[in-house]
Image: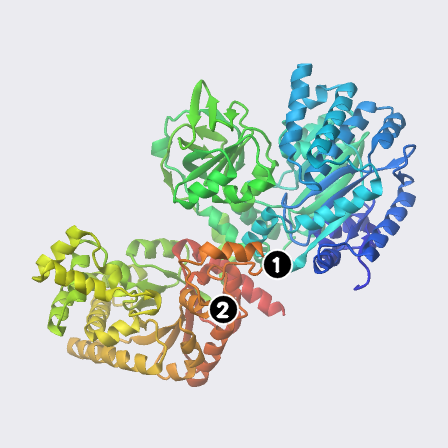
């Protein structure tokens, strides 16, 4: 298809999604199904990529193709672009292969100018409609193509409504709209020092280029990063003949879903407005009607729409999100796509479609985004705390869940305040695509305007963030950063709480509790477990964390960080004594104080895990992290150790390292101070023996993990210490106990010499956090300061600490796996870094032959589903 950059809707079909984008492919498919779709053509994703390859210039060949297809559209429509007597107007809309609602740009009513608008007024005998369309076009074109603030135009509209003493746009007369057009063009000229372009062909070329440009606008880049969408995909552009929902009370527009995107209930869910255009519904400028009301307004149109909705769902085997327009009682379909939905709805829809015979279990598993499951685990309000609480306002339950936090009034403040560790509720008149980063940083979103399909509602549901929309009782002053409701004013940073399941807003901080897991979740996750081969463990340092992970389906612990057990009360005193000790005997005495504490911790974890595998990592961080920094604590430690304060300060200073992440830590500590490994081994083994004695059917098999090994000789030395202590304890006890000794692969040299290390290691657990850090050569703690520049300049698309770098770090992982298996064919392989809960990374680990992944407790369901999807996809290749 290399030399063709433009396709008419009649030339495409749903299999051409990569080329035509999702919107273009689905429009073509609806035409193939004989549905009422306004004709048009698609400029391909390849044209977008060529635009960027050519230095952000549209090739003349592509321009020629566009206007050739425009001529064909004129013939099929019987209208002429730019002709006042019989004008063809078009919409110009983006459409990437992955749905990105609201992230890129759209222009409606393109082709209008001062002559065409008069011709349209005469042709339709509806001058008000013509000038309403013209003022919309000027505003959208100026905003999308020329970058003028949409809010400035809204100020003009508000001024005219105030002058005319009306509240609604629909109350403005034709003369009012003519005056609005005049003021819009005057503002355009004042801001840009040029006249509004009146040549329709110039308008079209500029609009198509603007959509291409919008592929790399900040909100689109942020959305792609969030949803793992490569920048190389590009966006298609759809040019479609306009049909008009704003021609009067026999016309209208709407958005609907074949099932509820909030609950998954199998009933038509949506909204419409009469005498309106599409953006009116989603922008929240007017409060829309529920789709069921259309049955009363236009029963024949409603019946036709219901039939089309059912047919589309059966065709795509998924819940559909549809846009439609009614022009003079005739229905037109403008879009269908697989609808965004809450996690709860995603599971219900998947389970129901299997029950209805539209999907197999495997297909159902593949249709749910694993990251969505996180939304199911968000908190609900504590029923005791909320009991008797009266809401200060009620809006629409746009995205379920509960949220409590401090009020902020713009997206930038939300992102900044959340970054400082605060819980944030973003309160807006209405949200727009520019707000996405702030929305993603918020615990909840409240909007004064907008319905259930507004921008705020759709985006919040996709993110799994609680949202209440259309809270009309609230009077907001964004400039002063206050809102008033019920006679009370709330200021920035005041606490409020939102219930996205009821639409209630509460005027104080409310306690929250974890969400209850419902039947659909259990059914769906059981299906996932049927197909996955990768085990899922958790990273847990306490029985509480382990218990939570078990509730989410964890099959063991892949990482117990023993250093996390040393930071409390008497423990921190003992570890400090050990660190500043001058002799082996002093160190051993200090460690003897820690032994019963550490042993008790391990016993509690073993008991909780009931015989499931538990991997315990020996002390890893540099010792200075445990040492006191305040004068008081230093003085107390000096007294306890019988030292002079200055002497202790000298020891602390001596332990300071310029680059502690690559310093005296991990296996290096056990080589310098084997007493540490001896104590930890005694705690691990004695705890296992004690728990096995109490629970005959548990059969605890400890997995002892030595961190930061880069050379087999390091592991050989420490393993000998471990085995000597462990074997003596086991022999003395008279009990039988199996145990394993392995290592973390987190240093590039270990990955490159894994065949040698496997001579000693019975298992590899990949520490991909440090492996990423050392492979890239930058600190994960400091990289945030400059990685944003890499994203902005398209050097990196993803944070390599969140999503495994499969080209570089992944190559080291695969190399280590292959070498390790060569030496020890039955070596156990797992991963315990943050990547263990990232779906795309989980698929990589499945494909290279890992036995398990380990992740934080709340990401266990995500990893389970990702592992199932990886197995299904691998099987189908």
Judge left or right: residue 640 versus residue 756. left
Locate the C terminus and report the quarter of the image it occupies: bottom right
Of marks 1 and 2, the one in the foreground: 1
Judge left or right: residue 348 versus residue 828. right
Q: CA distance from mark 1 to mark 2?
A: 20 Å
Q: Quadrant of residue 616?
A: bottom left
Nearest the eye: 421 or 290: 421
Q: Where in the figure is residue 773, as x and y percent of width and height?
A: 43, 66
Locate the N terminus and report the quarter of the image it occupies: bottom right
Read off the residue under disc 1. Answer: 230
Read off the residue under disc 2. Answer: 845
Q: Is residue 811 above or below residue 353?
A: below
- Disc 1 on helix, strand or loop? loop
Q: Is residue 820 above or below residue 385?
A: below
At x 30% / y 82%, what residue is drawn? 716
Q: Where in the figure is residue 14, as x and y percent of width and height?
A: 74, 55
**Whether residue 306 can be seen here:** no
Q: Where in the figure is residue 17, as x and y percent of width and height?
A: 72, 56
Which numbered disc, 1 or 2, marks the residue that appears first in the sequence? Answer: 1
Q: Residues within 10 Å of mark 2 (few under 14, many from 20)?
A: many
**Whether residue 759 can be seen here:** yes
Nearest the eye: 773 or 651: 651
Q: Is residue 474 above or below residue 633?
A: above
- Disc 2 on helix, strand or loop? helix
């Amino acid at each position: 298809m290399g030399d063709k950059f433009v396709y008419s809707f009649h030339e495409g079909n749903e299999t051409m999604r990569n080329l035509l984008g999702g919107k273009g492919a689905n429009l073509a498919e609806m035409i193939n199904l004989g549905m009422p779709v306004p004709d048009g053509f698609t400029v391909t994703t390849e044209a977008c990529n060529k635009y960027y390859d050519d230095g952000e210039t549209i090739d003349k060949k592509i321009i020629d193709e566009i206007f050739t297809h425009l001529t064909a559209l004129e013939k099929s429509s019987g209208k002429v672009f730019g002709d006042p007597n019989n004008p063809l107007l078009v919409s110009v809309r983006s459409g990437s292969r992955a749905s990105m609602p609201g992230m890129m740009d759209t222009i409606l009513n393109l082709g209008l100018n001062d002559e065409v608008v008069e011709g349209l007024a005469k042709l339709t005998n509806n001058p008000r409609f013509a000038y309403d369309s013209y003022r919309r076009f000027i505003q959208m074109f100026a905003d999308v193509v020329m970058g003028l603030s949409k809010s400035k135009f809204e100020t003009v509209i508000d001024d005219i409504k105030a002058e005319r003493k009306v509240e609604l746009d629909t109350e403005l007369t034709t003369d009012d709209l003519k005056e609005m057009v005049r003021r819009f063009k005057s503002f355009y000229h004042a801001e840009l020092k040029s006249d509004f372009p009146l040549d329709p062909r110039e308008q079209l070329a500029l609009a198509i280029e603007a959509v291409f440009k919008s592929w790399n606008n900040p909100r689109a880049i942020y959305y792609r990063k969030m949803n793992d969408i490569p920048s190389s995909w590009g966006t298609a552009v759809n040019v479609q003949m306009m049909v008009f929902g704003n021609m009067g009370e026999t016309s209208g527009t709407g958005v609907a879903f074949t099932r509820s995107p909030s609950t998954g209930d199998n009933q038509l869910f949506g909204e419409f407005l009469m005498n309106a255009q599409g953006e009116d519904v989603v922008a929240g400028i007017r409060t829309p009607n529920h789709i069921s009301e259309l049955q009363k307004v236009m029963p024949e149109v409603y019946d036709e729409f219901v039939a089309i909705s059912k047919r589309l769902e059966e065709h795509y085997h998924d819940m559909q999100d549809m846009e439609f327009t009614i022009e003079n009682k005739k229905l037109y379909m403008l879009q269908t796509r697989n609808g965004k939905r809450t996690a709860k709805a995603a599971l219900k829809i998947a389970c129901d479609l299997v029950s209805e015979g539209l999907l197999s279990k495997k297909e159902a598993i593949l249709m749910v985004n694993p990251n969505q499951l996180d939304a199911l685990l968000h908190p609900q309000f504590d029923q005791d705390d909320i009991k008797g609480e009266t809401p200060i306002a009620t809006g629409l339950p746009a995205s379920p869940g509960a949220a409590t936090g401090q009020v902020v009034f713009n997206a930038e403040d939300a992102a900044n305040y959340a970054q400082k560790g605060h819980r944030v509720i973003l309160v807006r008149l209405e949200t727009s695509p520019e707000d996405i980063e702030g929305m993603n940083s918020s615990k909840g979103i409240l909007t004064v305007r907008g319905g259930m399909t507004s921008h705020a509602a759709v985006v919040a549901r996709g993110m799994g963030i609680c949202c209440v929309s259309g809270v009309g009782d609230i009077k907001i002053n964004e400039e002063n950063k206050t809102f008033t409701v019920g006679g009370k004013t709330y200021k920035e940073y005041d606490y409020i709480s939102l219930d996205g399941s009821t639409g209630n807003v509460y005027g104080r901080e409310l306690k929250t509790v974890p969400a209850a897991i419902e039947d659909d979740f259990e059914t769906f996750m059981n299906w996932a477990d049927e197909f996955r081969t990768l085990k899922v463990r958790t990273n847990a340092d306490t029985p509480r964390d382990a218990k939570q992970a078990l509730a989410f389906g964890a099959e063991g612990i892949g990482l117990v960080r023993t250093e996390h057990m040393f930071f409390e009360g008497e423990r921190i005193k003992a570890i400090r004594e050990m660190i500043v000790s001058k002799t082996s005997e002093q160190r051993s005495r200090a460690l003897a104080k820690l032994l019963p504490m550490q042993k008790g911790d391990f016993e509690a974890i073993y008991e909780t895990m009931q015989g499931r595998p538990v991997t315990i990592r020996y002390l890893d961080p540099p010792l200075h992290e445990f040492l006191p920094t305040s004068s008081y604590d230093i003085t107390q430690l000096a007294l306890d150790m019988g030292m002079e304060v200055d002497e202790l300060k000298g020891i602390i200073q001596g332990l300071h390292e310029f680059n502690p992440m690559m310093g005296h830590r991990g296996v290096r500590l056990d080589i310098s101070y084997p007493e540490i490994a001896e104590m930890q081994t005694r705690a691990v083994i004695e705890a296992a023996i004690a728990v096995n004695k109490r629970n005959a059917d548990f059969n605890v098999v400890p997995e002892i993990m030595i961190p930061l090994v880069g050379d087999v000789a390091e592991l050989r030395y420490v393993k000998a210490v471990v085995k000597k202590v462990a074997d003596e304890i086991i022999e003395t006890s008279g009990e039988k106990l199996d145990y394993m000794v392995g290592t973390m692969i987190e240093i590039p040299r270990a990955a490159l010499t894994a065949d040698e290390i496997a001579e000693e290691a019975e298992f590899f657990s990949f520490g991909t956090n440090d492996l990423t850090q050392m492979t890239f050569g930058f600190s994960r703690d400091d990289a945030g300061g400059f990685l944003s520049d890499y994203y902005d300049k398209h050097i990196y698309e993803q944070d390599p600490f969140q999503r495994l770098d499969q080209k570089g770090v992944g190559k080291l992982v695969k190399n280590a796996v292959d070498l390790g298996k060569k030496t020890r064919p039955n070596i156990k392989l797992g991963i315990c870094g943050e990547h263990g809960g990232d779906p795309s990374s989980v698929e990589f680990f499945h494909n290279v032959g890992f036995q398990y992944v380990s992740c934080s407790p709340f990401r266990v369901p995500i990893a389970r589903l990702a592992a199932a999807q990886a197995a299904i996809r691998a099987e189908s290749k």
